[in-house]
């Protein structure tokens, strides 16, 4: 049993990570300020694992909160961040404060606490305007949004702390993660839960652009596998680097909508007739995203089990049961 800190533990990915770690028998502390995280995501965990699960309401922008949360921790999973490219374009300062200053605060706190390993959420947005496909970890372009800049700076800081202070850091470049507990609410909701909610409500689905942009949509359980492998690896060559965290196939938005209509119409046949509308492309969006997962396969033994269709079936079932 390890003592583990998960920052942003009440968020979509963070709460799933807390649940997995608790099921594996670890003692877990969740640090969250509930800016985007939800108490309902961890309410059940606080009841079921009250002996091993601790919640600290705090903000990574406050060094004292970081120090308190990391005390005694052997591993840190740093998931806390302000996501969303559009949000960062609308409010670059807050995105910078949380994603860069907050990240640095956590690195310093982890260093001072003698944490064994710091595993953090990096992002596929780091690839920026690089046109090469599939995306390989060592080849990136110029960032296309303030959010992308912040996530790239995280990688630079982690690398410097590893080389300067001897820390063990692993970054996981998430590619369009989806699944249970991902919120459909708000202006910055991710595309899959947003589309699902619109379909359940019998509303038209709005696609930005012509729908031929593609993404390497990655089901949450694949992401959990990568995080566990990053924590457990004893291979010294696998540490102090970054890994694509994806399935390794891409799906267009038009294909995505067709899959969602197919799977949701099993619950409500009317959804098969959902109308599709097209709007302008979003600023900062890259046309195509497809990951090479060869590095993760070779160094960590990564073997993702959920392709887009299997993952969507699981996600749709969860949304149908929880949004009705």
Image (tube, rainbow, N blue to C red):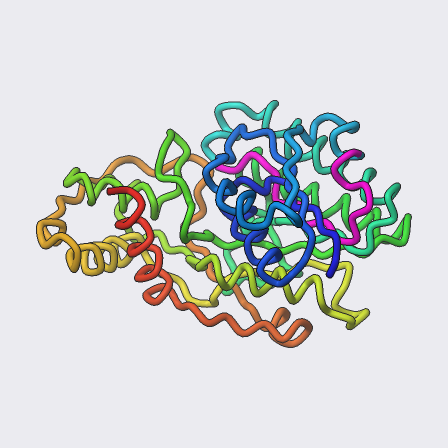
Whether residue 133 appears in this view of the structure is no
Where residue 159 appears, x then y in whole percent?
79, 51
Pick the quarter of the image with the N terminus. Answer: bottom right
Pick the quarter of the image with the C terminus. Answer: top left
Residue 310 drawn in magenta: no
Which segment is the magenta one? 68-84
Measuring 63% from the left and 37% from the top, which residue is drawn there? 55
Residue in front for this viewpoint, 144 or 67: 67
| Depicted 122 relative to depicted 81: above or below | below
Q: How many marks?
A: 0
Residue in front for this viewpoint, 217 or 43: 43
Whether residue 28 appears in this view of the structure is yes
Q: Quadrant of residue 106?
A: top right
Residue 71 drawn in magenta: yes
Measuring 66% from the left and 41% from the top, which residue is drawn there? 54
Measuring 56% from the left and 34% from the top, which residue is drawn there? 82
Where residue 108 appears, x then y in whole percent?
83, 38
Where residue 101 appears, x then y in whole percent?
72, 31
Measuring 88% from the left and 41% from the top, which residue is drawn there? 112
Where residue 207 appears, x then y in whole percent?
27, 42
């Amino acid at each position: 049993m390890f003592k583990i800190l998960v920052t942003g533990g009440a968020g979509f990915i963070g709460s799933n990570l807390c649940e997995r770690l608790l099921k594996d028998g670890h003692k877990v502390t969740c640090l969250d300020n509930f800016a985007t995280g939800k108490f309902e995501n961890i309410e059940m965990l606080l009841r079921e694992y009250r002996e091993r699960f601790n919640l600290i309401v705090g903000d990574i922008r406050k060094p004292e909160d970081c120090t308190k949360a990391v005390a005694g921790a052997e591993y840190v999973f740093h998931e806390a961040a302000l996501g969303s490219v559009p949000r960062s374009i609308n409010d670059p300062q807050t995105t910078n404060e949380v994603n860069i200053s907050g990240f640095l605060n956590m690195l310093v706190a982890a260093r001072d606490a003698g944490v064994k390993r710091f595993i953090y959420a990096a992002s596929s947005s780091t690839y920026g305007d690089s046109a090469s496909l599939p995306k390989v970890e060592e080849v990136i372009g110029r960032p296309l949004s303030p959010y992308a800049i912040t996530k790239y700076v995280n990688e630079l800081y982690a690398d410097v702390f590893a080389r300067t202070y001897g820390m063990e850091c692993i970054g996981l470049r998430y590619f369009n993660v989806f699944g249970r507990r991902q919120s459909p609410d708000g202006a910055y909701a991710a595309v899959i839960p947003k589309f699902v909610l619109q379909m359940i409500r019998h509303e038209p689905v709005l696609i930005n652009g012509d729908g031929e942009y593609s993404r390497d949509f990655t089901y949450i359980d694949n992401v959990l596998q990568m995080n566990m492998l990053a924590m457990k690896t004893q291979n010294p060559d696998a540490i102090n680097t970054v890994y694509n965290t994806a399935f390794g196939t891409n799906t267009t938005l038009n294909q995505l909508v067709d899959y969602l209509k197919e799977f949701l119409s099993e619950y409500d046949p009317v959804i098969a007739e959902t109308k599709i509308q097209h709007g302008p492309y979003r600023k900062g969006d890259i046309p195509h995203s497809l990951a090479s997962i060869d590095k993760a396969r070779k160094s960590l033994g990564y073997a993702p089990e959920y392709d887009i269709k299997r993952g969507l079936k699981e996600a749709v079932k969860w949304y149908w049961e929880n949004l009705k």
